[in-house]
Amino acid sequence: MSAFFLDSSALAKRYVSEPGSAWIQAITTPEAHHQIVIARIAWVEVLSALARRQREVSLPSAAAAAPLVFVSAGDRLIVAAQAEGISTDSPKSYV
């Protein structure tokens, strides 16, 4: 078992197929039993990068086939994501 700190550019590779994505997928799978550490701001940076790439239509076709869904229990965050055209879901919907 190892510990990995993923910056936003590495974390984004979990959601977009590009060079290095297979390795990121391999080290972050639960079966690998690695500890994955990210900065608190990483989710904002990744979401922003993916939204930008979606707007610019620069997401590879594999990513377009499996759209990212932003999941949050925070109503304000859901509204903000929806305002950017991002698909959303909330655990509150599954009570």
Image (spheres, helix red, strand yellow):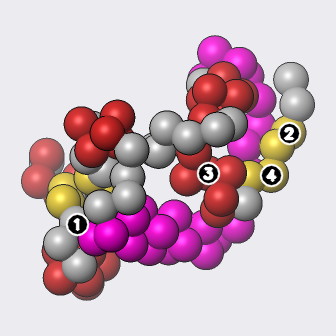
Residue at the image point whose x is 68% and y is 36% from the top? 20
Residue wearing tag 4: 5
Q: Which mark is residue 3?
A: 2
Circle 2 packing at 10 Å, graded few (<14), some (14-19), many (20+), is few
Mark 4 to mark 2 CA distance (whole Å): 7 Å
Dot 2: what SS? Answer: strand
Residue wearing tag 1: 86
Q: Of callouts 1 and 2, which one flags the residue occurring earlier in the amino acid sequence?
A: 2
Q: How many marks?
A: 4
Q: Of callouts 4 and 1, which one flags the residue occurring earlier in the amino acid sequence?
A: 4
Q: Nearer the viewer, residue 59 or 3?
A: 59
Magenta extent: 30-56
| Residue type at the position of mark 2 | Ala
Between tags 1 and 2, which lies in front?
Answer: 1
Dot 1: what SS? Answer: loop
Q: Nearer the viewer, residue 38 or 20?
A: 20
> Can you say whether 71 is above or below 67 in the image?
below
